Image (tube, grey):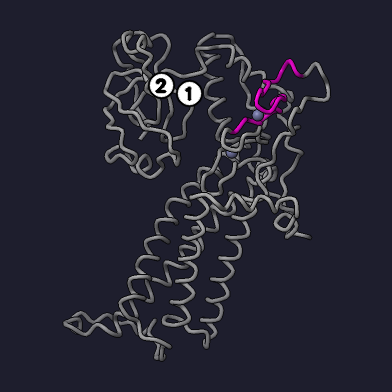
């Protein structure tokens, strides 16, 4: 099994330029700080290499770092796969079911979307991730998701080392008045002679690394859960939104259609195997996809065309039910809203209860859209567009959309 092939493929070497961006610089610095501090704390103070446990601990720490970096670099350098420029389907008639990308001068293959940052149509695009400075899509979905799992696991191990190092070393050194609060540390204390004393600098560095490790565990761990939920339904974050709009369109026009998401193969295990394989590369060529028996290759692209034709569903109408001050990480809007603020430089917009917003995309906790302005403001060409917490808005039902009474509906969370 040549598992190293993706990382050393010559044609990916030019991708090294992707490192020159704040995302990879910050991510790699955090990985470097946490892993080097965990190794130093272990071998100098907490668990020296001259014990069996110490050696196993050391090997495990190195192992985490290697696995994390392997998946991280593969996610970054391998990339999601791009639709060839000027691509068109084999059968000329099929172009009727596809959108055309003017920037790539080609048709958008099923599940692909044009990424403005990458400036190309991306295979099975999930999102553009600033931390890998690349899109997450078809080819790197598994590496990206494995990274999201391994990083918190490695951080938990490192956090354990940091806490134990500080605890045992402080217990050794601190004598003032602590004798009255004796804690039996017999289980973790061993008599050893560290190469250097545990001073203020190592303490501060360890404490800082602990903060980084715990923060990473929570933030990245939540991203992993979100990605897995999507993968087990064989969807992407973009398709979740398309599906929401499809249901909305069908409900509004009462067309009686039944929208079946075409790529969900019915079993979580089957869906999982589409993305995660032993070879590391996902099933399929990124253009043709296995589909649900009641669907055809272009079920989703036809739905996208219908949505495009239907101006009404290009955006979904929402009404503000809570004020929002425009803060990036607002307090009082729920834990997830605070933590899962979109990693983008796009603005946030303030909301006042009762205002109407046309949302064009969103995540589970945040939405992006245009505020509906007064006629005067609109005439003056003003535009208020940006992110706002999903918790502060409520979807307008079309029969009540023009009615000033807010719909009485229970909100999530
Ligand atoms: Zn394109
Ligand atoms: Zn991109």
| Residue 34 % position (x, y) | 46, 66
Which numbered circle lies on residue 370? 2
Q: What quarter of the picture does the C terminus occupy?
A: top left
Determine which residue is flagged by label 1: 360
Taking the magenta stretch, the answer to whether it contains residue 268 is no
Q: CA distance from mark 1 to mark 2?
A: 8 Å
CB within 8 Å, label 1 to label 2: yes
N-terminal of the two: label 1 or label 2? 1
Query: Bounds of the magenta span?
Result: 95-115
Quarter of the view holding residue 232:
top right
Would residue 244 appear left or right of 46 to someone viewing this image?
A: right
On the image, the x and y values in percent for residue 258 come to: 61, 18
Q: Is residue 294 visible?
A: no
**Quick check: 309 above or below 90?**
above
Provide the secondary structure element on which disc 2 rests: strand
**Number of numbered labels in the structure image:** 2
Picture disc at residue 339: none
Q: Is mark 1 within 8 Å of ligand 2?
A: no
Q: Quadrant of ligand 1?
A: top right
Q: Secondary structure at mark 1?
A: strand
Residue 319's x, y, as percent? 35, 20
Q: Nearer the viewer, mark 1 or mark 2?
A: 2
Based on the displayed image, in which of its 4 quarters is residue 250 positioned? top right
Relative depth, front residue between 267 and 225: 225
């Amino acid at each position: 099994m040549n598992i190293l092939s993706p990382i050393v493929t010559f044609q990916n070497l030019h991708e090294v330029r992707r490192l020159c961006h704040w995302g990879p610089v910050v991510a790699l610095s955090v990985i470097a700080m946490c892993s080097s501090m965990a190794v130093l704390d272990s071998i100098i103070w907490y668990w020296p290499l001259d014990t069996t446990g110490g050696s196993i601990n050391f090997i495990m720490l190195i192992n985490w770092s290697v696995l994390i970096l392997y998946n991280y670099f593969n996610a970054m350098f391998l990339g999601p796969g791009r639709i060839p420029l000027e691509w068109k389907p084999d059968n000329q008639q099929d172009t009727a079911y596809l959108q055309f990308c003017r920037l790539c001068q080609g048709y958008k293959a099923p599940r692909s979307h044009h990424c403005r940052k990458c400036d190309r149509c991306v295979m099975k695009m999930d999102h553009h991730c600033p931390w890998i400075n690349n899109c997450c899509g078809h080819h790197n979905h598994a590496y990206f998701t494995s990274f999201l799992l391994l990083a918190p696991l490695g951080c938990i191990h490192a956090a354990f080392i940091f806490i134990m190092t500080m605890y045992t070393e402080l217990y050794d050194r601190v004598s003032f008045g602590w004798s009255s609060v004796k804690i039996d540390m017999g289980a973790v204390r061993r008599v050893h002679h560290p190469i250097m004393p545990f001073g203020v600098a190592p303490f501060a560095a360890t404490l800082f690394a602990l903060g980084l490790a715990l923060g990473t565990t929570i933030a990245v761990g939540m991203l992993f859960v979100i990605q897995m939920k999507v993968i087990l339904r064989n969807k992407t974050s973009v398709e979740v939104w398309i599906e929401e709009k499809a249901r909305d369109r069908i409900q509004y026009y009462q067309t009686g259609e039944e929208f079946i998401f075409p790529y969900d193969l019915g079993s979580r295990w089957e869906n999982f195997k589409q993305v995660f394989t032993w070879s590391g590369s996902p099933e399929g060529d990124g253009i043709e996809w296995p589909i649900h028996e009641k669907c055809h290759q272009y079920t989703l692209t036809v739905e996208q065309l219908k949505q495009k034709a239907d101006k009404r569903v290009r955006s979904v109408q929402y009404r503000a039910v809570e004020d929002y001050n425009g803060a990036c990480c607002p307090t009082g809007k729920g834990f997830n809203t605070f933590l899962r603020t979109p990693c983008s430089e796009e603005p946030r917009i303030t909301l006042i209860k009762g205002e109407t917003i046309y949302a064009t995309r969103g995540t589970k906790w945040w939405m992006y859209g245009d505020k509906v302005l007064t006629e005067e403001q609109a005439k003056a060409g003003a535009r208020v567009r940006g992110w706002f917490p999903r918790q502060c808005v409520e979807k307008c039902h079309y029969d009540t959309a023009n009615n000033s009474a807010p719909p009485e509906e229970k909100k999530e969370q």
